[in-house]
Image (spheres, helix red, strand yellow):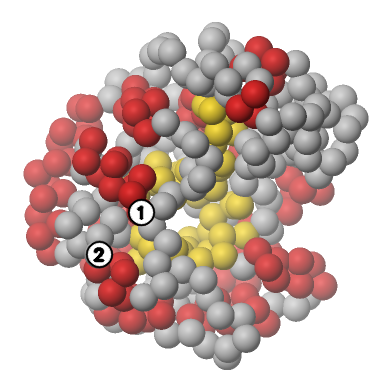
Amino acid sequence: MILKHFIWVLFSAALALGCSGCTEKQGNGPDDEGSADVGQQSRPDLMTLFYDTIEAQDKVNPREKVFIVAHRANTQKGINERLPENSLEIIQAAIESGVVDMVELDVRPTKDGVLVLMHDATVDRTTNGNGKVSDKTYAQILELDMNRENDKVQTGIKVPTLKQAFELCKGKMYINLDIHSKNVPVGTLADLIKECGMIDQVMIYSKKDELLEYQSIDPNFLIHPYVSSISSAKEYEQCFGAMLFQYGLKYDQESDDFARKMRAEGYLTYTNILDHDRDMLNGNYSYLQKFVNSETDFIQTDYAELVHKFLDVEGLR
């Protein structure tokens, strides 16, 4: 990890000069309108955040903050307002919440190679249409309205391109891109991240062989592997961009020391409370307490406001 830090110092200047903004290329979506001004980043780049967090912890216990990740950009307010998951509208709500540190977004390619935000292989659940994303052109996707959980009413909310999401989030929000088993062409995504100047705000979640492809293209790509053991995390030791690892917390245990052991090795950890998110709506925070006890660094949730409130009382916000 010390070697990685030294190399990062050498690379940081190159990162600052590497990307000047989104440009139109095949696969990015035509004439994306209505995006926010990109401006300059108002927060540290993600790699610097990771290194600073690791150094502050000094391989021991004193976490000053647990970071909150909005699953599919969901927040309690966004859900209550029936904003569709993975929409620009709910991403904006996450940005405005003031409690979300990162949004998790799902990406799939259309038939003509445009990268759009969509979790499912089909549009059935989250739009008023039906059929596979991969069978539809971008123009056909734009004919659909996004909805919340099988609600087929006309909303006027359109499926966004990944480029539009980048433009909205630039300088405002970190992104965890979930491309696992979604058939996203490595070259297309790598080019788009660089063209939009988002290499320092985005991490990529996928299977190992695909993550290694991104590292081979550019070691500055932040990759987000899923691991279940210290030894599997160490398989990424030669990967400059591997610092934050996702794992599954065992809900039936009072505590789980995996995150603690990972910290001792100089790694950061990320897990989710999605299976028990709704318990918090009834005032049951017992499972969230297990997450806090596990000493994980990032928690993924659909109810960021509730997680923030609890963590704030714990002195972790």
Residue 261, image x, y percentages:
33, 81
In depth, the one of 137 and 196 nearer the eye is 137
SS at circle 1: helix
Q: Identify the residue shown where x is 10% and y is 60%.
A: 3
Q: Quadrant of residue 139?
A: top right
In the drawing, what numbered circle is on residue 208? Answer: 1
In depth, the one of 165 and 253 nearer the eye is 253
Q: Is residue 131 left or right of residue 220?
A: right
Residue type of the residue flagged with mark 2: Glu
Residue 205, image x, y percentages:
44, 50
In depth, the one of 300 and 169 nearer the eye is 300
Q: Identify the residue shown where x is 30% and y is 59%.
A: 243
Q: Is residue 260 left or right of residue 60?
A: right
Q: Are marks 1 and 2 in contact (CB under 8 Å)?
A: yes
Residue 248, image x, y percentages:
51, 71
* Residue 1 in sight here: yes
Q: Is residue 54 left or right of residue 310?
A: left
In the drawing, what numbered circle is on residue 235? Answer: 2
Does 48 sit above or below residue 244?
above
Q: Identify the residue shown where x is 54% and y is 55%.
A: 69
